[in-house]
Amino acid sequence: MTRDLSNIVKAYDVRGLCPGELDADIARALGAAFARFAGSPRIVTARDMRESGVELSRAFAEGATSQGVDVVEAGLGSTDLLYYAAGTLDVPGAMFTASHNPARYNGIKLCLAGARPVGQDSGLAQLRADAERYLDEGLPPYDGEPGTVSVQDLLAGYAAYMKALVPGIEDVRPLKVVVDAGNGMGGHTVPAVFEGLPLETTSLYFELDGSFPNHEANPIDPANTADLQAKVVELGADIGLAFDGDADRCFVIDERGEIVSPSVLTALIAARELAKHPGAIVIHNLITSKVVPEVVAENGGTPVRTRVGHSFIKAEMARTGAVFGGEHSGHFYFAEFWNADSGMLAALHALAALGTQDGTLSELLTTYDRYAASGEVNSTVDDQAARVAAVKERFADRPQDELDGLTVELEGGAWFNVRASNTEPLLRLNVEAPDIATMERVRDEVLGLIRS
Protein backbone atom coordinates (compact mmCIF):
# COMPACT_ATOMS: atom_id res chain seq x y z
CA MET A 1 0.00 0.00 0.00
CA THR A 2 1.37 3.39 -1.01
CA ARG A 3 2.48 5.58 1.90
CA ASP A 4 0.43 8.73 2.43
CA LEU A 5 2.57 11.78 3.23
CA SER A 6 -0.27 14.30 3.15
CA ASN A 7 -0.07 14.78 6.92
CA ILE A 8 3.52 16.05 6.79
CA VAL A 9 3.81 17.71 3.37
CA LYS A 10 2.34 21.12 4.16
CA ALA A 11 1.69 24.18 2.01
CA TYR A 12 5.26 25.48 2.21
CA ASP A 13 7.42 22.71 3.66
CA VAL A 14 7.62 19.24 5.15
CA ARG A 15 6.97 19.06 8.89
CA GLY A 16 5.94 16.36 11.35
CA LEU A 17 6.61 14.46 14.53
CA CYS A 18 10.04 12.88 14.54
CA PRO A 19 10.01 10.02 15.26
CA GLY A 20 6.47 9.06 14.37
CA GLU A 21 5.60 10.91 11.16
CA LEU A 22 8.95 11.85 9.60
CA ASP A 23 11.82 9.37 9.46
CA ALA A 24 14.99 8.50 7.54
CA ASP A 25 13.15 6.43 4.92
CA ILE A 26 10.89 9.36 4.06
CA ALA A 27 13.85 11.76 3.99
CA ARG A 28 15.73 9.39 1.66
CA ALA A 29 12.75 9.19 -0.71
CA LEU A 30 12.34 12.97 -0.66
CA GLY A 31 16.06 13.39 -1.36
CA ALA A 32 15.79 11.24 -4.46
CA ALA A 33 12.62 13.02 -5.57
CA PHE A 34 14.15 16.45 -5.03
CA ALA A 35 17.33 15.52 -6.91
CA ARG A 36 15.28 14.49 -9.95
CA PHE A 37 12.88 17.44 -9.67
CA ALA A 38 15.46 20.20 -9.19
CA GLY A 39 17.44 19.28 -12.32
CA SER A 40 20.78 20.40 -10.91
CA PRO A 41 24.02 18.39 -10.67
CA ARG A 42 24.54 19.71 -7.14
CA ILE A 43 22.43 20.66 -4.13
CA VAL A 44 23.26 22.14 -0.71
CA THR A 45 21.89 21.16 2.70
CA ALA A 46 21.96 22.64 6.20
CA ARG A 47 20.32 21.65 9.48
CA ASP A 48 19.30 23.20 12.77
CA MET A 49 20.20 21.95 16.25
CA ARG A 50 17.58 19.19 16.54
CA GLU A 51 19.30 15.84 17.06
CA SER A 52 17.12 14.10 14.48
CA GLY A 53 18.43 16.48 11.82
CA VAL A 54 21.69 14.54 11.58
CA GLU A 55 19.96 11.31 10.55
CA LEU A 56 17.41 13.03 8.33
CA SER A 57 19.95 15.12 6.42
CA ARG A 58 22.22 12.09 5.96
CA ALA A 59 19.34 10.01 4.57
CA PHE A 60 18.25 12.87 2.29
CA ALA A 61 21.81 13.03 0.93
CA GLU A 62 21.75 9.28 0.32
CA GLY A 63 18.60 9.68 -1.73
CA ALA A 64 20.02 12.57 -3.74
CA THR A 65 23.38 10.93 -4.43
CA SER A 66 21.58 7.75 -5.55
CA GLN A 67 20.35 9.83 -8.49
CA GLY A 68 23.83 11.08 -9.43
CA VAL A 69 23.52 14.46 -7.69
CA ASP A 70 26.37 15.82 -5.55
CA VAL A 71 25.49 17.14 -2.09
CA VAL A 72 27.29 20.02 -0.38
CA GLU A 73 26.71 19.84 3.37
CA ALA A 74 26.86 23.23 5.09
CA GLY A 75 26.23 21.56 8.45
CA LEU A 76 24.69 23.57 11.25
CA GLY A 77 23.03 26.74 10.03
CA SER A 78 20.01 29.01 10.11
CA THR A 79 17.41 28.91 7.38
CA ASP A 80 18.68 32.19 5.98
CA LEU A 81 22.20 30.70 5.87
CA LEU A 82 20.74 27.96 3.66
CA TYR A 83 19.15 30.65 1.46
CA TYR A 84 22.56 32.38 1.29
CA ALA A 85 24.11 29.07 0.21
CA ALA A 86 21.46 28.46 -2.45
CA GLY A 87 21.90 32.02 -3.69
CA THR A 88 25.68 32.31 -3.78
CA LEU A 89 26.31 28.77 -5.00
CA ASP A 90 23.33 29.03 -7.37
CA VAL A 91 22.10 25.55 -6.47
CA PRO A 92 18.92 24.08 -4.98
CA GLY A 93 18.85 23.68 -1.21
CA ALA A 94 17.27 21.73 1.63
CA MET A 95 17.07 23.01 5.21
CA PHE A 96 16.30 20.52 7.98
CA THR A 97 14.29 22.37 10.60
CA ALA A 98 10.91 22.55 12.26
CA SER A 99 11.42 26.29 12.86
CA HIS A 100 9.51 27.35 15.99
CA ASN A 101 7.74 24.02 16.50
CA PRO A 102 8.23 22.06 19.74
CA ALA A 103 11.12 19.65 20.20
CA ARG A 104 9.20 16.58 19.01
CA TYR A 105 9.03 17.94 15.47
CA ASN A 106 11.39 18.22 12.53
CA GLY A 107 10.97 19.13 8.90
CA ILE A 108 12.48 20.15 5.56
CA LYS A 109 12.30 23.51 3.79
CA LEU A 110 13.21 23.28 0.11
CA CYS A 111 14.26 25.89 -2.43
CA LEU A 112 15.59 25.98 -5.97
CA ALA A 113 18.74 27.73 -7.16
CA GLY A 114 18.73 31.38 -6.17
CA ALA A 115 16.62 30.53 -3.09
CA ARG A 116 13.43 30.34 -5.16
CA PRO A 117 10.72 28.79 -2.95
CA VAL A 118 9.22 25.35 -3.42
CA GLY A 119 5.62 25.13 -2.21
CA GLN A 120 2.52 23.09 -3.00
CA ASP A 121 1.94 24.95 -6.26
CA SER A 122 5.60 25.05 -7.27
CA GLY A 123 6.72 21.46 -6.87
CA LEU A 124 5.96 20.22 -3.36
CA ALA A 125 2.85 18.29 -4.44
CA GLN A 126 4.89 16.52 -7.13
CA LEU A 127 7.68 15.75 -4.68
CA ARG A 128 5.16 14.23 -2.29
CA ALA A 129 3.71 11.99 -5.02
CA ASP A 130 7.17 10.89 -6.17
CA ALA A 131 8.36 10.19 -2.62
CA GLU A 132 5.22 8.15 -1.88
CA ARG A 133 5.92 6.05 -4.97
CA TYR A 134 9.57 5.53 -4.03
CA LEU A 135 8.58 4.41 -0.55
CA ASP A 136 6.29 1.83 -2.15
CA GLU A 137 8.46 0.70 -5.07
CA GLY A 138 12.01 1.62 -4.02
CA LEU A 139 14.26 4.42 -5.28
CA PRO A 140 14.36 4.74 -9.06
CA PRO A 141 17.38 3.15 -10.78
CA TYR A 142 20.16 5.41 -12.05
CA ASP A 143 22.66 4.28 -14.70
CA GLY A 144 25.50 6.68 -13.96
CA GLU A 145 27.91 7.13 -11.08
CA PRO A 146 26.37 8.08 -7.73
CA GLY A 147 26.87 11.60 -6.50
CA THR A 148 29.38 12.62 -3.86
CA VAL A 149 29.01 14.31 -0.48
CA SER A 150 31.33 17.17 0.51
CA VAL A 151 31.41 19.57 3.45
CA GLN A 152 31.68 23.36 3.10
CA ASP A 153 31.72 25.89 5.94
CA LEU A 154 29.69 28.91 4.81
CA LEU A 155 29.28 30.76 8.11
CA ALA A 156 32.01 33.37 7.62
CA GLY A 157 30.82 34.17 4.10
CA TYR A 158 27.24 34.43 5.30
CA ALA A 159 28.22 36.82 8.11
CA ALA A 160 30.14 39.13 5.79
CA TYR A 161 27.36 39.09 3.18
CA MET A 162 24.66 40.03 5.67
CA LYS A 163 26.57 42.99 7.04
CA ALA A 164 27.35 44.22 3.53
CA LEU A 165 23.60 44.51 2.80
CA VAL A 166 22.83 46.86 5.71
CA PRO A 167 23.90 50.52 5.36
CA GLY A 168 25.41 52.00 8.49
CA ILE A 169 25.93 48.78 10.41
CA GLU A 170 29.71 49.23 10.46
CA ASP A 171 29.31 52.80 11.79
CA VAL A 172 27.00 52.22 14.76
CA ARG A 173 27.85 53.72 18.12
CA PRO A 174 28.56 51.33 21.00
CA LEU A 175 25.31 49.58 21.96
CA LYS A 176 24.27 47.28 24.78
CA VAL A 177 22.39 44.39 23.17
CA VAL A 178 20.66 41.39 24.71
CA VAL A 179 20.01 38.45 22.38
CA ASP A 180 17.76 35.49 23.21
CA ALA A 181 18.49 32.65 20.78
CA GLY A 182 16.03 30.29 22.47
CA ASN A 183 18.64 27.49 22.21
CA GLY A 184 18.17 27.78 18.45
CA MET A 185 20.37 28.66 15.51
CA GLY A 186 20.77 32.32 16.48
CA GLY A 187 23.26 31.00 19.01
CA HIS A 188 25.36 29.80 16.08
CA THR A 189 25.00 32.71 13.65
CA VAL A 190 24.81 35.79 15.90
CA PRO A 191 28.41 35.55 17.23
CA ALA A 192 29.76 35.31 13.68
CA VAL A 193 27.68 38.22 12.36
CA PHE A 194 28.25 40.50 15.37
CA GLU A 195 32.02 39.94 15.36
CA GLY A 196 33.82 43.25 14.77
CA LEU A 197 30.80 45.43 15.59
CA PRO A 198 30.88 47.74 18.65
CA LEU A 199 28.20 45.75 20.45
CA GLU A 200 28.28 44.72 24.10
CA THR A 201 26.22 41.56 23.72
CA THR A 202 24.57 39.64 26.55
CA SER A 203 23.64 36.14 25.38
CA LEU A 204 20.57 34.27 26.58
CA TYR A 205 20.22 30.58 25.73
CA PHE A 206 22.89 30.40 23.04
CA GLU A 207 23.58 26.70 23.73
CA LEU A 208 22.30 24.72 20.76
CA ASP A 209 19.69 22.39 22.23
CA GLY A 210 16.77 21.05 20.23
CA SER A 211 14.95 20.05 23.42
CA PHE A 212 14.46 23.78 24.20
CA PRO A 213 15.10 23.52 27.95
CA ASN A 214 14.36 27.20 28.70
CA HIS A 215 11.38 28.11 26.52
CA GLU A 216 10.03 27.36 23.06
CA ALA A 217 11.91 29.14 20.29
CA ASN A 218 8.79 30.97 19.17
CA PRO A 219 9.02 34.71 19.93
CA ILE A 220 5.58 35.49 18.51
CA ASP A 221 4.24 34.14 21.83
CA PRO A 222 4.93 36.84 24.44
CA ALA A 223 5.57 34.18 27.09
CA ASN A 224 8.76 33.29 25.24
CA THR A 225 10.18 36.82 25.31
CA ALA A 226 9.61 37.43 29.03
CA ASP A 227 13.19 36.55 30.01
CA LEU A 228 14.59 38.82 27.31
CA GLN A 229 12.34 41.72 28.26
CA ALA A 230 13.35 41.44 31.91
CA LYS A 231 17.06 41.24 31.08
CA VAL A 232 16.92 44.32 28.83
CA VAL A 233 15.43 46.35 31.69
CA GLU A 234 17.75 44.85 34.30
CA LEU A 235 20.90 45.71 32.32
CA GLY A 236 19.68 49.03 30.95
CA ALA A 237 20.31 47.67 27.46
CA ASP A 238 19.60 49.64 24.31
CA ILE A 239 17.81 46.82 22.48
CA GLY A 240 16.80 43.18 22.75
CA LEU A 241 16.61 40.65 19.92
CA ALA A 242 14.71 37.34 19.98
CA PHE A 243 15.18 34.71 17.26
CA ASP A 244 13.04 31.68 16.54
CA GLY A 245 14.44 28.16 16.24
CA ASP A 246 15.84 28.42 12.71
CA ALA A 247 16.52 32.16 13.07
CA ASP A 248 14.54 33.21 10.02
CA ARG A 249 12.42 35.47 12.26
CA CYS A 250 13.53 38.14 14.70
CA PHE A 251 11.47 40.08 17.23
CA VAL A 252 12.77 43.32 18.73
CA ILE A 253 12.47 44.63 22.31
CA ASP A 254 12.99 48.34 23.05
CA GLU A 255 14.96 49.79 25.98
CA ARG A 256 11.82 49.83 28.14
CA GLY A 257 11.37 46.10 27.73
CA GLU A 258 8.42 46.59 25.37
CA ILE A 259 7.87 44.35 22.33
CA VAL A 260 8.18 46.23 19.04
CA SER A 261 5.35 45.39 16.67
CA PRO A 262 6.59 43.63 13.52
CA SER A 263 4.53 46.16 11.56
CA VAL A 264 6.49 49.01 13.13
CA LEU A 265 9.73 47.23 12.27
CA THR A 266 8.44 46.69 8.73
CA ALA A 267 7.82 50.44 8.39
CA LEU A 268 11.30 51.27 9.73
CA ILE A 269 13.05 48.87 7.35
CA ALA A 270 10.87 50.00 4.45
CA ALA A 271 12.00 53.59 4.98
CA ARG A 272 15.65 52.46 5.06
CA GLU A 273 15.29 50.36 1.92
CA LEU A 274 13.59 53.23 0.09
CA ALA A 275 16.50 55.48 1.03
CA LYS A 276 18.71 53.01 -0.87
CA HIS A 277 16.21 52.49 -3.70
CA PRO A 278 14.15 55.69 -4.21
CA GLY A 279 10.70 55.19 -5.66
CA ALA A 280 10.74 51.40 -5.27
CA ILE A 281 7.87 49.04 -4.47
CA VAL A 282 7.39 47.56 -0.98
CA ILE A 283 5.13 44.57 -0.33
CA HIS A 284 3.06 44.15 2.84
CA ASN A 285 0.43 41.60 3.73
CA LEU A 286 -3.08 42.68 4.56
CA ILE A 287 -2.67 42.08 8.32
CA THR A 288 0.16 44.58 8.71
CA SER A 289 -0.62 47.98 10.18
CA LYS A 290 -1.82 50.87 8.01
CA VAL A 291 1.40 52.58 9.06
CA VAL A 292 3.32 50.44 6.56
CA PRO A 293 1.68 51.72 3.35
CA GLU A 294 1.59 55.21 4.86
CA VAL A 295 5.34 55.24 5.55
CA VAL A 296 6.11 53.71 2.16
CA ALA A 297 4.14 56.47 0.42
CA GLU A 298 5.65 59.18 2.64
CA ASN A 299 9.11 57.98 1.61
CA GLY A 300 8.32 58.07 -2.09
CA GLY A 301 7.69 54.35 -2.56
CA THR A 302 4.72 52.36 -3.82
CA PRO A 303 3.01 49.99 -1.35
CA VAL A 304 1.51 46.76 -2.69
CA ARG A 305 -0.86 44.73 -0.54
CA THR A 306 -0.93 40.93 -0.69
CA ARG A 307 -2.34 37.86 1.02
CA VAL A 308 -0.79 36.36 4.14
CA GLY A 309 1.92 33.76 3.53
CA HIS A 310 5.49 33.79 2.33
CA SER A 311 4.68 32.25 -1.05
CA PHE A 312 2.40 35.19 -1.86
CA ILE A 313 4.95 37.75 -0.64
CA LYS A 314 7.77 36.19 -2.65
CA ALA A 315 5.62 35.85 -5.77
CA GLU A 316 4.59 39.51 -5.60
CA MET A 317 8.16 40.62 -5.01
CA ALA A 318 9.27 38.71 -8.10
CA ARG A 319 6.34 39.98 -10.17
CA THR A 320 6.66 43.64 -9.17
CA GLY A 321 10.40 43.95 -8.61
CA ALA A 322 9.82 45.10 -5.03
CA VAL A 323 12.86 45.80 -2.87
CA PHE A 324 11.36 44.66 0.43
CA GLY A 325 8.41 42.85 1.95
CA GLY A 326 7.13 42.50 5.51
CA GLU A 327 4.58 40.41 7.37
CA HIS A 328 2.85 40.85 10.72
CA SER A 329 4.32 37.51 11.84
CA GLY A 330 7.90 38.81 11.88
CA HIS A 331 9.03 37.62 8.45
CA PHE A 332 11.01 40.19 6.42
CA TYR A 333 11.95 39.67 2.76
CA PHE A 334 14.75 41.41 0.87
CA ALA A 335 15.25 41.67 -2.90
CA GLU A 336 19.02 41.78 -2.41
CA PHE A 337 18.71 38.48 -0.53
CA TRP A 338 17.06 36.65 -3.44
CA ASN A 339 13.60 37.76 -2.20
CA ALA A 340 14.08 35.44 0.77
CA ASP A 341 13.31 36.19 4.41
CA SER A 342 15.94 36.78 7.05
CA GLY A 343 15.69 37.45 10.76
CA MET A 344 19.34 38.47 10.81
CA LEU A 345 18.90 41.21 8.22
CA ALA A 346 15.94 42.58 10.18
CA ALA A 347 18.06 42.60 13.35
CA LEU A 348 20.93 44.36 11.60
CA HIS A 349 18.60 47.03 10.18
CA ALA A 350 17.23 47.71 13.67
CA LEU A 351 20.76 47.95 15.09
CA ALA A 352 21.92 50.24 12.28
CA ALA A 353 18.91 52.53 12.59
CA LEU A 354 19.37 52.79 16.35
CA GLY A 355 23.14 53.03 16.36
CA THR A 356 23.50 55.78 13.76
CA GLN A 357 21.47 58.29 15.82
CA ASP A 358 21.57 59.38 19.45
CA GLY A 359 18.05 58.67 20.70
CA THR A 360 16.56 55.58 22.29
CA LEU A 361 14.83 52.90 20.26
CA SER A 362 11.38 53.86 21.55
CA GLU A 363 12.01 57.48 20.56
CA LEU A 364 13.22 56.40 17.12
CA LEU A 365 10.11 54.30 16.54
CA THR A 366 7.58 56.91 17.68
CA THR A 367 7.02 58.09 14.13
CA TYR A 368 6.13 54.53 13.07
CA ASP A 369 3.90 53.59 16.02
CA ARG A 370 0.61 55.23 15.11
CA TYR A 371 -2.18 52.73 15.79
CA ALA A 372 -3.53 50.33 18.40
CA ALA A 373 -3.70 46.68 17.31
CA SER A 374 -5.41 43.67 18.83
CA GLY A 375 -2.88 41.13 17.67
CA GLU A 376 -4.26 37.89 16.26
CA VAL A 377 -7.20 36.57 18.30
CA ASN A 378 -8.19 32.96 17.54
CA SER A 379 -11.66 31.50 18.04
CA THR A 380 -12.68 27.85 17.66
CA VAL A 381 -15.89 27.63 15.62
CA ASP A 382 -18.08 24.86 14.23
CA ASP A 383 -18.81 26.51 10.89
CA GLN A 384 -16.18 28.97 9.65
CA ALA A 385 -18.12 30.06 6.57
CA ALA A 386 -21.33 30.74 8.50
CA ARG A 387 -19.57 32.86 11.11
CA VAL A 388 -17.76 34.92 8.44
CA ALA A 389 -21.07 35.37 6.63
CA ALA A 390 -22.63 36.73 9.83
CA VAL A 391 -19.82 39.25 10.20
CA LYS A 392 -20.09 40.20 6.53
CA GLU A 393 -23.84 40.82 6.85
CA ARG A 394 -23.49 42.88 10.04
CA PHE A 395 -21.06 45.27 8.31
CA ALA A 396 -22.68 45.18 4.87
CA ASP A 397 -22.81 48.99 4.78
CA ARG A 398 -19.02 49.32 5.15
CA PRO A 399 -16.31 48.87 2.46
CA GLN A 400 -15.21 45.21 2.31
CA ASP A 401 -12.81 43.06 0.36
CA GLU A 402 -12.06 39.33 0.31
CA LEU A 403 -8.46 39.20 -0.86
CA ASP A 404 -7.72 36.95 2.12
CA GLY A 405 -10.66 36.27 4.40
CA LEU A 406 -12.87 39.29 5.00
CA THR A 407 -11.44 42.79 5.54
CA VAL A 408 -13.80 45.57 6.63
CA GLU A 409 -12.99 49.28 6.75
CA LEU A 410 -14.78 51.21 9.51
CA GLU A 411 -15.37 54.89 10.16
CA GLY A 412 -12.61 56.83 11.84
CA GLY A 413 -9.74 54.78 10.42
CA ALA A 414 -10.40 51.44 12.14
CA TRP A 415 -10.42 48.14 10.24
CA PHE A 416 -10.50 44.43 10.91
CA ASN A 417 -9.80 41.16 9.10
CA VAL A 418 -11.29 37.73 9.76
CA ARG A 419 -9.55 34.73 8.18
CA ALA A 420 -10.20 31.00 8.44
CA SER A 421 -7.34 28.72 9.39
CA ASN A 422 -6.48 26.21 6.66
CA THR A 423 -5.58 23.47 9.13
CA GLU A 424 -7.75 23.99 12.22
CA PRO A 425 -11.42 24.91 12.94
CA LEU A 426 -10.36 28.45 13.82
CA LEU A 427 -11.18 31.98 12.77
CA ARG A 428 -8.38 34.51 13.18
CA LEU A 429 -9.31 38.11 13.96
CA ASN A 430 -7.04 41.15 13.63
CA VAL A 431 -8.27 44.64 14.52
CA GLU A 432 -6.55 48.02 14.24
CA ALA A 433 -7.79 51.44 15.25
CA PRO A 434 -6.41 54.91 16.02
CA ASP A 435 -6.75 54.32 19.77
CA ILE A 436 -7.01 51.44 22.24
CA ALA A 437 -10.62 52.13 23.25
CA THR A 438 -11.87 51.98 19.65
CA MET A 439 -9.82 48.88 18.94
CA GLU A 440 -11.23 47.08 21.98
CA ARG A 441 -14.81 48.06 21.12
CA VAL A 442 -14.49 46.76 17.55
CA ARG A 443 -12.66 43.63 18.69
CA ASP A 444 -15.31 42.75 21.24
CA GLU A 445 -18.19 43.35 18.83
CA VAL A 446 -16.70 41.17 16.09
CA LEU A 447 -15.73 38.45 18.57
CA GLY A 448 -19.33 38.46 19.76
CA LEU A 449 -20.48 37.70 16.20
CA ILE A 450 -17.81 35.04 15.70
CA ARG A 451 -18.42 33.24 18.99
CA SER A 452 -22.20 33.53 19.20
Image (cartoon, helix red, strand yellow):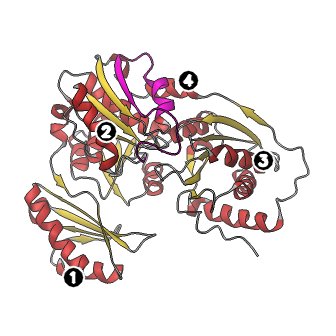
Q: Secondary structure at mark 3?
A: helix
Q: Earlier in the sequence, mark 2 or mark 3?
A: 3
Q: Secondary structure at mark 2?
A: helix
Inter-mark Cα distance, 4 to 1? 56 Å
Q: Earlier in the sequence, mark 1 or mark 2?
A: 2
Question: Comparing marks 4 and 1, which lies closer to the viewer?
Answer: 4
**Label 4: which residue?**
156
Residue 90 seen in the figure: yes
349 lies above or below 303: above
Three-letter residue code for mark 2: Asp
**Label 1: which residue?**
393
**Label 3: which residue?**
62
Three-letter residue code for mark 3: Glu
Residue 280: in magenta span: no
Q: Which mark is residue 227?
A: 2
The answer to the question of whether label 4 and label 2 lie on touching residues, with beta carbons closer than 8 A, is: no
Which residue ends up furthest to the front in the rendered image?
A: 213
Quarter of the figure with residue 46:
top right
Residues in magenta, as a range? 187-216
The answer to the question of whether label 1 and label 3 lie on touching residues, with beta carbons closer than 8 A, is: no
